[in-house]
Image (tube, helix red, strand yellow):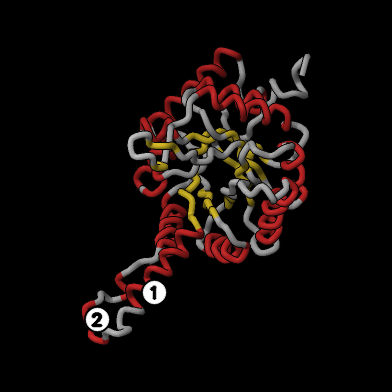
Amino acid sequence: MDLSTHYLGLELNSPLVPSASPLSRSLDTCRQLEDAGAGAIILWSLFEEALTAETETSARFLSEQHTGFAEASGFLPNYHDFRPALETYLEHLRQLKETLGIPVIASLNGVTVGGWVAHARALEEAGADALELNVYYVAANPDESGAEVEGRYLGLLDALRHQISLPINMKLSPNFSSVAYMVKRLEAAGADGVALFNRFYQPDINLDNLRLQPALYPSTSPESLLAMRWIALLHGRVGLSLGATGGVHNAEDAVKLLLAGADVVHLCSLLLREGPGALRRVRAGIEGWMVDQGFDNLAEFRGRMSALAVPNP
């Protein structure tokens, strides 16, 4: 079966792309994902605020301890023994490019235009094949309009588009008043693709100590229906790449998203729970379905169930 697809201007041998997760931190795991049939690898997200906090903490402990205690510097480790997170990320990216035969996509989560541009340049120089932008922004300010929130996304994209030549993928949440219109605006601003949809962390409440606590729950298959609907509505109406993310746990989930018109299908919770071998099972399931239906390649059925193709959209 020919599962090749086009994504962000790249030629992939498979539409199955592991999304940003801790799995990408291991070189051996990335090799296993490639062997299992991954079309590309998306690295874990590089958070600008985490890098800023690391720099401030290092400066406080390594550069300011002598204030009032001149002898303290003699007890401190050598600054060069500490490897910044950005340097570690870039070195890992270079190693993956040397080892893997599939595209490696960097993931950047930033909060300021300056930080995004500086880090995006470093990722491009390290050899990333594309860049996924995860604008993790919760619009919680009641005085901020929807247009202002959209402007934040567009402004960041515009700043990057003028500084780097890498294909750019925007990972979006479903919380826009008009998802289709926002995607069209991003395409006009230079985005090469969108990933639908991001899952925001939701805080929980501990009833015993009356404190807020973090909560992270794996996705479930029904969650993929949200991306399926919007990809079906967008397929054939926009020219950028469409990636489906969230809720893909088996071959049936993946096939439905491809029928809706997705160029790639991202996997995360399934791989975190079962490991790289689960991707091989999903790929085998897609190929088995194609044999049963008489399809030889992905292009023959991708978008067959989009809004432009069904009798009663």
> Does residue 236 appear in the picture of this structure?
yes
The type of residue carrying mark 2 is Ala
Badge number at residue 72: 2
Question: Around disc 2, counting alpha carbons within 10 Å, would you say few (fewer than 14), some (14 to 19), or many (20 or more)?
Answer: few
Name the foreground residue: 233 vs 262: 233
- Above/below status of 9 relative to 297: below
User: Quick one: label 1 or label 2, which is nearer the N terminus?
Assistant: 1
- Position in image of residue 275 (x %, y %): 36, 34
Which amino acid, by three-letter code, is at mark 1?
A: Ala
| Position of 83 relative to 216 (above/below) | below
Residue 34: image location, x then y, percent = 44, 40
The residue at which mark 1 appears reads as 59
The quadrant in which residue 62 appears is: bottom left
Q: Is mark 1 on a helix, strand or loop?
A: helix
Count how many numbered circles sit on residues in the image.
Answer: 2
Seen from the viewer's position, the closer of residues 7 and 107 is 107
| Residue ID at (51%, 49%) | 104
